[in-house]
Image: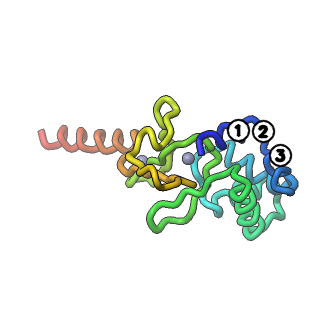
């Protein structure tokens, strides 16, 4: 997994798509660029809203198709969290996701020192990992700060 990820990085996204017998069409590129540009793990609908700015006649179905192609080619990873809609992540390095319970923000937590999942988690030797998804939940720094400010204000009032 880690090796494959590293190897993929040497190729341009165009090469990777070609390797799957497909072409980097304008629509696929537009969708990929939105994911690369924002890095905020958008849903398909959010990608659609952004892409429409550049490709005005693109449909939501086409955006779904592009996302599926990019995922099948290994350029993008699907991120799922509980019952929320699927989100998309172009970061191919092994990483976990942090989900903020307050604002819904999703951010990347890289593995320290590029460790492999087997180095961090107790993985039995007889299982093969094809894909791993690690999720943390909590409060992002922005939301934690907001909460602190609120409780400070409350404390001032009660004095
Ligand atoms: Zn990610
Ligand atoms: Zn937050």
Report the disc number at residue 11: 2
User: In x, y percent, where is residue 72?
Assistant: 71, 59
- Label 1: which secondary element: helix
- The image quadrant where one finds the C terminus is top left
Looking at the image, the residue that sits furthest to the left is: 159
- Label 3: which secondary element: helix
User: In x, y percent, where is residue 129?
Assistant: 53, 53
Answer yes or no: disc 2 within 8 Å of ligand 1. Answer: no
- Tally the numbered discs: 3
- Label 2: which secondary element: loop
Q: Look at the image and name its color scheme.
A: rainbow
User: In x, y percent, where is residue 142?
Assistant: 41, 41
Spatial distance from mark 1 to mark 3, Cα to Cα? Answer: 14 Å
Disc 2 and disc 1 in contact, CB within 8 angstroms = yes
> Which residue is at the front of the view, 75 or 29?
75
Report the disc number at residue 14: 3
Q: Is residue 136 left or right of residue 31?
A: left
User: In x, y percent, where is residue 150?
Assistant: 28, 44
Spatial distance from mark 2 to mark 1, Cα to Cα? Answer: 7 Å
Report the disc number at residue 7: 1
Considering only vertical position in the picture, is 114 above or below 98? Answer: above
- How many neighbours does mark 2 have within 10 angstroms: few (below 14), some (14-19), or many (20 or more)? few
- How many neighbours does mark 3 have within 10 angstroms: few (below 14), some (14-19), or many (20 or more)? some
Mark in the foreground, 2 or 3:
2
Quadrant location of residue 93?
A: top right
Mark in the foreground, 1 or 3:
1
């Amino acid at each position: 997994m880690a090796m494959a990820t590293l190897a993929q990085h040497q190729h341009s996204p165009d090469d990777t798509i070609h390797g799957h017998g497909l072409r980097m069409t304008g629509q696929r590129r537009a969708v990929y660029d939105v994911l690369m540009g924002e890095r905020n793990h958008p849903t398909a609908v959010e990608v659609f809203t952004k892409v429409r700015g550049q490709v005005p006649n693109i449909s939501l179905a086409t955006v779904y198709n592009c996302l599926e192609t990019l995922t099948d080619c290994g350029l993008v990873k699907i991120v799922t969290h509980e019952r929320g809609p699927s989100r998309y992540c172009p970061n191919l390095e092994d990483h976990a996701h942090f989900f903020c319970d307050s604002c819904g923000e999703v951010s990347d937590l890289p593995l320290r020192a590029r460790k492999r999942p087997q180095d961090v988690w107790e993985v039995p030797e007889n299982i093969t990992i094809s894909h791993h998804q690690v999720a943390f939940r909590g409060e992002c720094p922005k939301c934690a700060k907001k909460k602190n400010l609120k409780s400070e204000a409350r404390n001032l009032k009660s004095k």
